[in-house]
Amino acid sequence: MDGVPPVVVVEAYAELARRVLAGPARLGRTRLVAVDGPSGAGKSRFAAHLADALAALPGAARPPVVHTDDLLDGWDDQLTFWPRLDEWVLGPLRAGRDGSYRRYSWVRRCFLPRPVPVPAAPVLILEGVSAARAAVAPEVTLAAFVTAPASLRLARAVARDGPEIVPELRRWHAGERAHFAADDTATRVDLVVDGAPTLPHDEDRYYVRIR
């Protein structure tokens, strides 16, 4: 019903980590966790805490975390980077082999020569805008969509990268809005996460889920 606030609940990263490991490996031998959502929503923080929780489980290791921003060839590659991700990372893991990628330098505006290894581990966390796009859904073990108010997301990005990025950022926001609407991402994922929660909780151990 319009005007009714969403129901939110505090959940433990440790429980989510156990859920991931209990799920099926659909990308070769790897359980792919996709953390999607608009820029500045808190995706990187959520992905890092989930990786820490997975590392804390008995006999487990910290999974690799791949940020899609590291594979973009500049601002204009917002959604068209996927073939590069598939060739360098997802394709090898699908075949049971280690992957690797070259990280894009937003300062030098080129891909750096040194490869970043991505082992064929039990879990891979893929974080970034369009990480949970419909095309990869059959290979995803768990998908999350992190959200936050637009004004706060803009403020976070400006605080992180400086006011000079605002023109590009506004164009980026328009692109991601169009993508999420066409992809229907938020309704397909396994959980929607509040990236700007007001509910008191230990942010290192718990996250706030929107039901």
Image: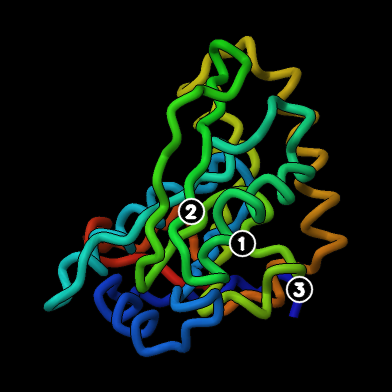
Quick one: 55 or 183, which is closer to the camera? 55
Disc nearer the start of the sequence (1/3): 3
Helix or strand or loop: what does disc 2 sit on?
strand
Left or right: 30 with respect to 189?
Answer: left
What kind of residue is marked 3?
A: Asp
Q: Which mark is residue 149?
A: none
Residue located at (36% from left, 73% from top): 122
Where does the image place residue 84, in percent across and percent down from the top left? 68, 45
The residue carrying pointer 2 sits among few (fewer than 14), some (14 to 19) or many (20 or more) residues within 10 Å by Cα, namely many
Q: Are marks 1 and 2 in contact (CB under 8 Å)?
A: yes
The residue carrying pointer 3 sits among few (fewer than 14), some (14 to 19) or many (20 or more) residues within 10 Å by Cα, namely few
What kind of residue is marked 1?
A: Gly
Helix or strand or loop: what does disc 3 sit on?
loop
Quick one: 84 or 24, which is closer to the camera? 84
For the residues labelled 2 and 3, the Cα–Cα distance comes to 46 Å
Left or right: 90 with respect to 182?
Answer: left
Q: Nearer the viewer, mark 2 or mark 3?
A: 2
Q: Which residue is mark 3?
A: 2
What kind of residue is marked 2?
A: Gly
Q: Which residue is mark 1?
A: 91
Disc nearer the start of the sequence (2/3): 3
